[in-house]
Amino acid sequence: MAQPYFSQLSDFLKPLIDVLGDDHDIECTHFFSGAAVYVDGQICMSLTPVGFALKLPNAPREMVLSEGGQPLRYFPSGPVKKGYVLLPDAVINSPDERTALMKTCIESAS
């Protein structure tokens, strides 16, 4: 079940690996029932049945929340993951916006 998430997240990362790969150790791995990205050993994004979440600094996170993003909870009654935001479909489906946010996520992870 996790393979489609792993494949999709790997595809999302491809344009960034070429740009940022020399400066950071970026790894996409299986993560529970989805996939996660680790940068320099720190998890910073995940794609799971819950959605696509990035750990972002405050200003870009607030911008995503204002565009329809949601705080990340892996379970309905679970705690909010500090610093993470679920991207709304409009952002996920906009390669330029998605990639820019992923770049911010990666650069702030290390």
Image: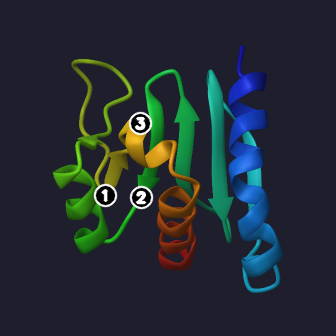
The residue labelled by disc 1 is: 83
Q: Amino acid at mark 1?
A: Gly
Q: Is residue 88 left or right of residue 68?
A: right
Quadrant of res 32: top right
Where's residue 46, x and y in %? 55, 42
Where's residue 40, x and y in %? 68, 71
Residue drawn where x is 65% and y is 58% of the image: 38
Q: Nearer the viewer, mark 3 or mark 1?
A: 3
Q: Quick one: label 2, few (<14), some, or many (20+) residues within 10 Å?
A: many
Position of 77 relative to 95 (above/below): above
Instruction: Give the Cα separation between the discs numbered 1 and 2.
Output: 5 Å
Identify the image quadrant of the C terminus.
bottom right
Q: Is residue 86 left or right of residue 28?
A: left
Position of 23 relative to 63 (above/below): below
Q: Which mark is residue 89?
A: 3
Residue farthest top in this picture: 1
Earlier in the chain: of badge 3 and badge 1, it is 1
The residue tagged with tag 1: helix, strand or loop? loop
Q: Amino acid at mark 3?
A: Asp
Q: Is residue 52 left or right of residue 40?
A: left
Residue drawn where x is 20% and y is 62% of the image: 62
C-beta proximity under 8 Å, tags 1 and 2: yes
Position of 36 relative to 4 (above/below): below
Earlier in the chain: of badge 1 and badge 2, it is 2
Earlier in the chain: of badge 2 and badge 3, it is 2
Q: Which mark is residue 55?
A: 2
